[in-house]
Image (cartoon, rainbow, N blue to C red):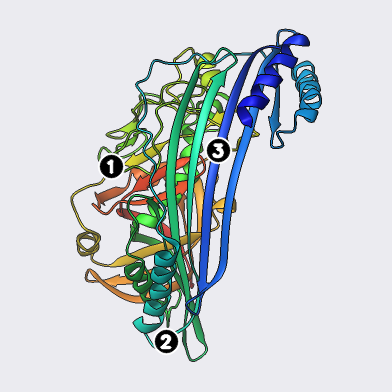
Amino acid sequence: MVKAYIKELTRRAAEQGIARLSFYLEESSGRNLVVFDGQPEKLEYSEQQLLFVEAEVEGYCGSTFIENFDMELIDEQLETMKEAAIARKKPFVAYEFPQLSAEDSAVSDWMPLNQLLEQLAEAEKAAYAADARISKVQHCGCHESKHCITLMDQDGNALSQNSEVGGFHLGVTAQEGNDLQLGGKGKTFLLNSYPDFVSLAKEAAESAVSKLGSSSYPTAATPVVLDKAVVCELMDAFMPTFYGKNIQNHMSLLEGKLGQSIAGENITISEEPQMENGLVQRRFDDEAVLCTQKNLIEKGIFRSCLYNRQSAAAAEVVSGGNGIKPSFSDEVETGYTNVLLHPGQKSREELLQEMGNGLLITSVSGTFAGANAVSADFSLIAKGYRVENGQIGSGVTQITVAGNFFEMLGRVRSIGNDLGNMYSRTGCVYGPSLYIEQLMISGEE
């Protein structure tokens, strides 16, 4: 149906003087299963075909997005393209297709539904069995999705790439008297490698129970070990500081710092588009530009920005393949594939031993409001544990952790070997636990 629609759209466009059509086709399918008391509470399937079209209209770029492939609506779509071109007067840039070998088109199978239901039910049961203080499993579910993105033009040139990911999450409540604490465990995975749901459920239960009896912590500049999950959340929040467009628009403190030291010598952060077992595998971006490996920070030195075609042209450099659409209907912005803070040699336990006394911070919240991507400052609600003589002690809550992301990277004493990840629509960040010399903790006076 889509091919026939594109053919007819191209024919009618030519009749109206609209030329050089480019197409971005996103095809996806998904499944979402949630269980409650061992039974399916929600089962959803989805399937979509979505199309974004750009073309040259009187020398400018006209665009429209299409969700309904009704031939009767084609003239309306062409009128939208004309209006967009005249209103924005944006230059049209056609795809320049790179030479690439054929992609492995093998597609992974979803886990059989009855097996998935059984494993989720076992995970829910394991959470309750882990500790008598688990009063409720709030959520236990798994979603899986398959995406195929195809870029093509009206002359028959085309490139396609597939992605297949799943996600598991289990959330629980632990209760002891009037003390209630929430815990959870989530994991994003490739569909050819489903995780052990039962083990994750036990970790979720442990995370909630261990917070019972939590209290605040004295306000002070304190040695801190940041858990890998927290490191990933901070990396995700501050990735926009590396965007070429933000640097050019004076919206990043990295402006003018290329080639300068912005972190400790033990810090290297790279983008790895073809990272082995990476959750994002991209050979080209949404502008048909090859995605290349690059070091953003190399041994503390700021080495590279993330550019799409427009920001690369403004900087008079070549785009490294970071033109990414936030969604199919949006114009291309800046994004990334797999961004890796290179791990060290020590386990998290060894980092705690090295620190001796301080805080282990295991979760933060409020990055949408408390992390400033322009200044790289953050002030976030946090939870964790006291650490005494290298051993994890009682839980800590009702505190705020504050600092500057790059100053923090300059105070990293040791780096863990325990990579975590955080997956989003624009990419995936990977980071290990970090022992930070000190961060400002605000708690009890």
Q: Earlier in the sequence, mark 1 or mark 2?
A: 2
349 sits to left or right of 22: left
Determine contact: label 1, label 2, CB under 8 Å.
no
118 is higher (above) or lower (below) than 345: below
Callout 1: SS:
loop
Q: Check the image and name the residue furthest to the bottom.
A: 177
Q: Which residue is the site of mark 3?
A: 27
Residue at horizontal 58 percent and vertical 59 percent from the top = 44
Q: Which residue is the site of mark 2?
A: 133
Callout 2: SS:
loop
Q: Residue type at mark 1: give it.
A: His
Label 3 packing within 10 angstroms: few (<14), some (14-19), many (20+): some
168 is higher (above) or lower (below) than 207: above
Residue at horizontal 19 percent and vertical 54 percent from the top = 346
Q: Residue type at mark 2: give it.
A: Arg
374 is higher (above) or lower (below) than 11: below
Res. 15 visible in picture = yes
Q: Earlier in the sequence, mark 2 or mark 3?
A: 3
What is the spatial separation of the Cα atoms under label 1 and label 2, in whole angstroms?
38 Å
Determine contact: label 2, label 3, CB under 8 Å.
no
What is the spatial separation of the Cα atoms under label 1 and label 3, in whole angstroms?
33 Å
Residue at horizontal 34 percent and vertical 34 percent from the top = 272
Label 2 packing within 10 angstroms: few (<14), some (14-19), many (20+): some
330 sits to left or right of 349: right
Which of the two marks, 1 or 2, is nearer to us in this view? 2
What is the spatial separation of the Cα atoms under label 2 and label 3, in whole angstroms?
45 Å
Mark linked to residue 14: none
In the picture, which quadrant includes the N terminus? Answer: top right
Callout 3: SS:
strand
Q: Dividing the picture into quarters, in which one does residue 115 lie?
A: bottom left
Q: Which residue is the site of mark 1?
A: 342
139 is higher (above) or lower (below) than 28: below
